[in-house]
Image: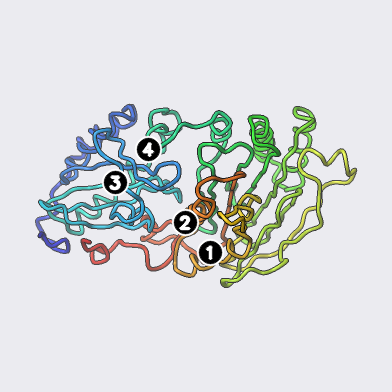
């Protein structure tokens, strides 16, 4: 088998810049269904044999090729899945050459993997494989916003109408900056109705929100959608204070859906100082995890009415609470469907099992998006894949000590031990 660590002075052939310019221009107007052929042409222009694009399915169990002639690969137990889970390259023997599995990452959001096939591998070709993955991550991100075909490729079941409507409002699963990361998951993936999450980075602030609309029908989803729209409208109009945002949601629901309401928690984190301000409107208390333990009561607050009901019960503004996080702190927002999931004997998943799972996964070095992927699958398995209620989890982390490095292309969270810019860190498996 070829030695992937072999480096030769003659292994850096000149790249036809004019050809690359043509391919980049072509990518701007290419239909998503044309991307498999385009990926191969781009690979050839960089001295590689071929490239195949795989995207994670909605539940992050499969890596689905956008080439319809190929079969999906499991996230668990495959080299492709290892690259996706760890956000690090993986080299595998392909018999007549090597396959480099490169993570496809849009900022902090894991999209899937790129399978780059090459006869030999050295530092130059490794770098070009990484560049190719970065390029197609941007291409995929730009096209999936308007391509029903790309969206459909990542689905394995028919989606209910309430879920279709609500998912149209959701942001990417994971967002981040050099100082913070926020990631979320929700189930049932194809039947969600009233739960939702939102997160956004505005200059030096991270805004997060989790909502639980009452009921499990189209109106529950509509209530949540109106709440998200009101929050975003306020933020985008310059209103960054949690009290302003909550007030706009209360007003919008009272005006447009006066008989409907939702519970929720809204947070604003100053990413330079660690100051966290939050409002809890009838929702389960957020949890603060520090040094691998839950700080009981750290984010407790007096009860307030659900969103949309404030004007009926109180005449005073919403109470905003404040604390200061420490570097590395994680905050968990969740809906009650998480802890109330029951096994065959009727025993609840419970808060202790929930937090213990997250602490153990983080201690094992898993990144926050992978922690939540594993956790939501554990909740589904616990309830035999039949959730009685929507289940949504959002985790955000403050990490001001983190600074961008050359390994950040492989490790958007910057955690040590998972990156891989060195060819020696990606030997074939």
Horizontal relation, residue 209 to residue 9: left or right: right
| First reached walking from the N terminus: tag 3 or tag 1 | 3
Q: Position of residue 130 (x, y in %)?
A: 29, 51
> Residue 374: which numbered mark, if any?
2
Could you say which disc has been placed on residue 357 in the image?
1
Nearer to the camera, 128 or 70: 70
Query: CA separation, marks 3 and 1?
Result: 30 Å
Cβ atoms under marks 2 and 1 closer than 8 Å: yes
Which label is found at residue 114? Answer: 3
Instruction: Name the image quarter holding residue 6.
Output: bottom left
First of labels 3, 2 by sequence position: 3
Residue at 56% x, 71% y: name it.
292
If you read the primary sequence from the N terminus, does the residue marked by circle 2 or circle 1 appear first?
Answer: 1
Q: Secondary structure at mark 2?
A: helix
Which structural element holds mark 1? helix
Lower position in the chain sequence, tag 4 or tag 1: 4
Residue 8 on image: x %, y %: 11, 60
Residue that label 4 marks: 140
Image quadrant containing the N terminus: bottom left
The relative height of residue 307 versus residue 30 in the rendered view (above or below) is below
Which mark is first along the chain, 3 or 4?
A: 3
- In the image, 275 versus 191, the foreground residue is 191
- In front of the other: label 3 or label 1? 1
Q: Marks 3/2: CA distance?
A: 22 Å
Q: Quadrant of the C terminus?
A: bottom left
Secondary structure of the residue carrying numbered label 3: strand
The reply, left or right, for residue 290 in relation to residue 296 is: left
């Amino acid at each position: 088998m070829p030695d992937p660590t072999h480096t030769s002075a003659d292994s850096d052939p000149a790249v036809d810049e004019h050809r690359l310019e043509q391919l980049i221009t072509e990518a701007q107007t290419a239909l998503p269904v044309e991307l498999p052929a385009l990926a191969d042409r781009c690979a050839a222009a960089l001295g590689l044999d071929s490239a195949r694009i795989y995207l994670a399915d909605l539940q992050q169990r499969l890596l689905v090729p956008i080439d319809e002639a190929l079969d999906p690969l499991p996230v668990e137990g495959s080299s492709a899945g290892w690259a996706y889970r760890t956000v690090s390259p993986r080299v595998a023997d392909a018999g007549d050459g090597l396959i480099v599995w490169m993570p496809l990452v849009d900022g902090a959001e894991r999209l899937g993997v790129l399978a780059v096939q090459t006869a030999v591998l050295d530092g130059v070709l490794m770098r070009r494989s990484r560049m190719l993955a970065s390029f197609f991550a941007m291409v995929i991100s730009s096209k999936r916003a308007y391509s029903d075909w790309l969206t459909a490729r990542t689905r394995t079941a028919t989606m209910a109408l309430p879920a279709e409507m609500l998912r149209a409002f959701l942001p990417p699963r994971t967002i981040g900056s050099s100082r913070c990361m926020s990631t979320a998951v929700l189930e049932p993936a194809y039947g969600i109705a009233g739960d939702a999450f939102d997160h956004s980075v505005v200059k030096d602030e991270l805004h997060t929100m989790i909502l639980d609309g009452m009921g499990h029908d189209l109106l529950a989803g509509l209530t949540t959608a109106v709440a998200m729209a009101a929050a975003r409208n306020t933020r985008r109009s310059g209103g960054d204070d949690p009290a302003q945002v909550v007030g706009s949601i209360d007003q919008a629901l009272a005006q447009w859906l006066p008989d409907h309401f939702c519970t929720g928690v809204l947070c604003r984190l100053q990413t330079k100082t660690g100051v966290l301000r939050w409002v809890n409107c009838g929702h389960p208390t957020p949890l603060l995890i520090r040094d691998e333990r839950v700080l009981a009561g750290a984010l407790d607050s007096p009860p307030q009415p659900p969103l949309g009901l404030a004007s009926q019960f109180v005449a005073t503004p919403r109470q905003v609470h404040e604390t200061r996080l420490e570097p590395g702190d994680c905050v968990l927002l969740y809906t009650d469907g998480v802890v109330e999931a029951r096994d065959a004997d009727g025993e609840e998943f419970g808060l202790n099992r929930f937090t213990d799972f997250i602490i153990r996964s983080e201690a094992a070095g898993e990144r926050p998006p992978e922690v939540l992927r594993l956790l939501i699958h554990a909740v589904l398995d616990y309830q035999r894949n039949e959730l009685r209620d929507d289940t949504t989890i959002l985790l955000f982390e403050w990490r001001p000590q983190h600074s961008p490095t050359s390994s950040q292309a492989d490790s958007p969270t910057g955690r040590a031990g998972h990156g891989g810019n060195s060819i020696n860190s990606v030997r074939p498996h």
